Amino acid sequence: MDGTAGWGARLMNSSITGMSPWIVFTLLLGPGRYELAAWLALAVAVVLVLVRHRPVFLEVAGLVLFAVLTVVGMIAPPETLRWLEAYANEVSDLAVVALAVLSVAARVPLTTPYARRKVPRAFWHTPGFLRANVVVTHAWSLAFLAAALAGGVGDLVLHDPDNLWTAWLIPASALVTAMRFTEWYPAVPRPPVRSLLMPFVGLLIPMGVLVLVFDAAPRWFAVGLIIVGVILARALRKEVAVAQQEGREP
């Protein structure tokens, strides 16, 4: 029970959780899926606000944004709904970017409330604490900016809102990078830089399979992704085994 409670506390004290409504919306939205994406993002936002004794600004902002997008989707005519299916993703992604930039300018980065739950009060106003939150907040803004730009390319250049690369692979890679960076950068002592690449080991193989199945790139490229993923996975497992063995040695 204590382990479960500790895991839940860590989850709720992570800025990744605060970003989860946007992550759900970004990865789910596509042609014919606007209402589903909006409702699920809103449901996640509602849960986050309800379980807090003191709501966090980021989560309240998500609740307001996705409540508006959900209501608009319910009353919008077909033409507007088609526009939302194509561009609401970019709107929501850029909303996060704007909130992140404004929060940094106000010297209260979006990740600050979550970091304060992990760090003693004595450190809250130190330069290092502020710098860590500025850097992590910028990491999230860059991830959502990358997702918005990828979506814009898919919508405006390729005229394919459901393109595998621009709608799924690039946004997912950007968001996974931000998630990993959020845990890596503030850690003391900070893990080696190579540990930032670990999430991609888990992404390369399914990414290669998807590219192969949907014929989203030359076959040699898809096979290459799978092979590189397998090689890196084996190398990572070997490194972990060595580290565990060294940890057991007196």
Image (spheres, helix red, strand yellow):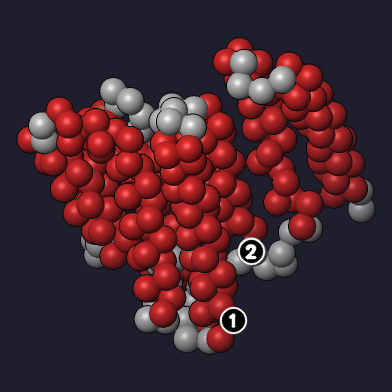
Q: Amino acid at mark 1?
A: Gly
Q: Residue at x 25, y 36 (%)?
A: 83
Residue 190 falls left or right of residue 174: right
Find residue 110 and report its horizontal and vertical position in percent: 40, 67
Q: Which of marks 2 and 1 precedes in the sequence?
A: 1
> Where is mark 2, residue-wise?
185
Label 2 packing within 10 angstroms: few (<14), some (14-19), many (20+): some
| Residue 57, percent from left and from top | 28, 65
Q: Secondary structure at mark 1?
A: helix
Residue 49 can be seen, yes or no: no
Q: Is residue 44 left or right of residue 70?
A: right
How many marks the image carries: the answer is 2
Identify the residue at image location x=57%, y=15%.
Answer: 214
Q: Nearer the viewer, residue 156 or 206?
A: 156
Query: Which residue occupies the extreme top position in the image?
Result: 213
Residue 79, position as x, y percentages in the image: 17, 31
